[in-house]
Image: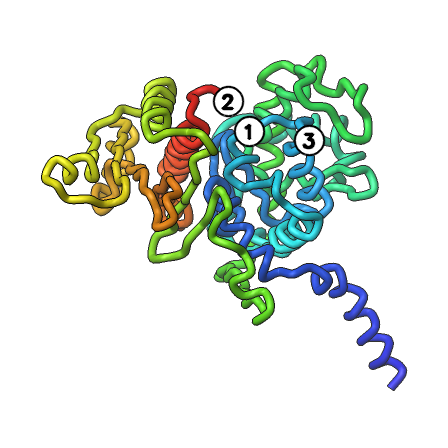
Amino acid sequence: MLKRIIAAACLLAVSLPTLSANLANGQELNKSCALCHGAHGQGASGKLSPRIAGLPKEYIIKAMKDYVEGHRVYPLMVRTAQLEKFTERDFDDVAAYLSSLDLSSDGRFNIQSSFGDVDEGKDIYRSDCKNCHNSDGYGKPSKEAPPLAGQHPEYLYTTMRNFAEQQRVHANDKEDDTFSDYKDQDFINLAAYLATLDDNRVIKGYAFQAPTYAPSLAEFGSRKLNESIQITDIKQTVVRMALDAGVTTEKAEEAMLAKAEEIGLKKVAQQKVSQFLARQDVTMPHLSIFQFCNPLDARLMVMADPVFSSYMPCRISMVEDADGKLWLMMLNLDMLINSKLLPNEVVETAIRVNQQMLDVMAAGAAGKSSS
C-alpha cells in the first residue's frame, strides 16, 4: 500500500507542471506559431524556421518575452503571433504545449546534415560546448542552456554566427567569447555533429501523434473575433489581419505592392471586385484580391507534386466585414509545411513563402512597407 502511495505521489509530482498549464489554450495559441514553425513546432531545414517542439518551457517563455521586449528582433513574428497581447498565462500555456511535443522518437523528424565533418565537430563540441549543453546535447536548465540536439543545422549555424558577431549573447554569460576564434568551417562542422545527437532516440516504426485538447465549456468562445490577427480552422487554415486604425484601402494596397516588390514577389493579378460591381450599380462591402508569385518557387513546388498548382498563385484578399472593419486574409501554406512526404527543400520554400506573404500582409495592415 505504501509503495502505491509513493508511486502515486511521484507521478503527481512529475505531472503537475503540465497539468497546471491550460494545454487547450496553448494548442489554440500555437496556431499562430504554426504559420512559420509548422503545426507540431517541427520547423524546417534552413535558417528561417527553428524547431520549437520539445524545448524546455522556461526557455520558450524567455525567448518569446525577449522578442516582445526587443532583446531579440523580429517584428513580423511579434505581430503575427500577437505576442505583445499575451498574458502571463498565455506565455505559460503555449510554452507548456510546445514543450510537451516530443518528436525525437519519430524518424520522419530526425535531423540530418549533408555538410561538415562530424568528427571535427565532435571535438569542438566536447571542448567548448558540453559543459553547458550537456554531453548528449540536450541542454542543462541549471545553466539556462537549451538543447542543441534535434535542432536544424542551418539555423544552428546562423545562430552561432550571430553569437560570434555579438548580435546575440549567452544569457548566463554576456561576456562569453567562445566563438570569437572560430572559422566558418568550424561552425559547419559543429552543426554537422549536433545533427547526429538525436539519432539514438529514433524508434523504428514509431509515428508521432499530436495530442488534442478540448477547451472547457467556460473557455469555449472566450476569444473574441475582434482581435487584430485571427487563425480560423477550415480544411485549410486562414490567417486574418486587421488594418490598423486610419489605414485606408488605398494605403494598404500601396504598402502591400511596395513590400512585395521589395522582397521579390511578383504581382501577377489583381481583382477589385467591389469597385467593378459598383460600376454596374451593384453595391457590396469592399473586396479586392491580390495575387503574387515567385516563378522559381512555383516551379519547385509543382515539380514536387503537380497538385500544388491548384494553390497558386498566392492570394491576399482585402475585405470589409459586416461592421465595416477592413481585414486582410490569406490561406496559410501549412498543408505544405506539415506534409511528411515532401523534400526538405520544398518544405523550406513553403515556410519562406508563408513568411513573405505575412510580410506583405503586415505592411498592408500598417499602411507602410517598412517596419
Residue 330: percent from left, percent from top: 35, 42
Q: Which residue is mark 1?
A: 75
Residue 152: percent from left, percent from top: 54, 36
Q: Which residue is mark 2?
A: 371
- Lower position in the chain sequence, tag 1 or tag 3: 3
Q: What amino acid is at disc 1?
A: Pro
- Lower position in the chain sequence, tag 2 or tag 1: 1
Q: For this rendering, which residue is in front, 91 or 128?
A: 91
Q: Secondary structure at mark 3?
A: helix
Q: What amino acid is at disc 3?
A: Glu
Q: Residue at x 63, y 21 (%)?
A: 162
Query: In this view of the protein, can residue 104 be seen by the observer?
Result: yes
Colour scheme in use:
rainbow
Distance, label 2 to label 1, CA atoms, is: 7 Å
Residue 329: percent from left, percent from top: 36, 42
Query: In this view of the protein, can residue 352 be seen by the observer?
Result: no
Residue 1 versus residue 148 in the image, above or below: below
Q: What amino acid is at disc 2?
A: Ser
Q: Residue at x 73, y 41 (%)?
A: 139
Label for residue 69? Answer: 3
**In the image as oriented, which residue stretches furthest toward the front?**
281
Q: Are marks 2 and 1 in contact (CB under 8 Å)?
A: yes
- Lower position in the chain sequence, tag 3 or tag 2: 3
Q: Secondary structure at mark 1?
A: helix
**In the image as oriented, which residue stretches furthest toward the right?**
2
**In the image as oriented, which residue stretches furthest toward the left?**
280
User: Could you classify mark 3 by the number of other residues whose Cα lies within 10 Å: few (under 14), some (14-19), or many (20 or more)?
Assistant: few
Say left or right for 299 vs 161. left
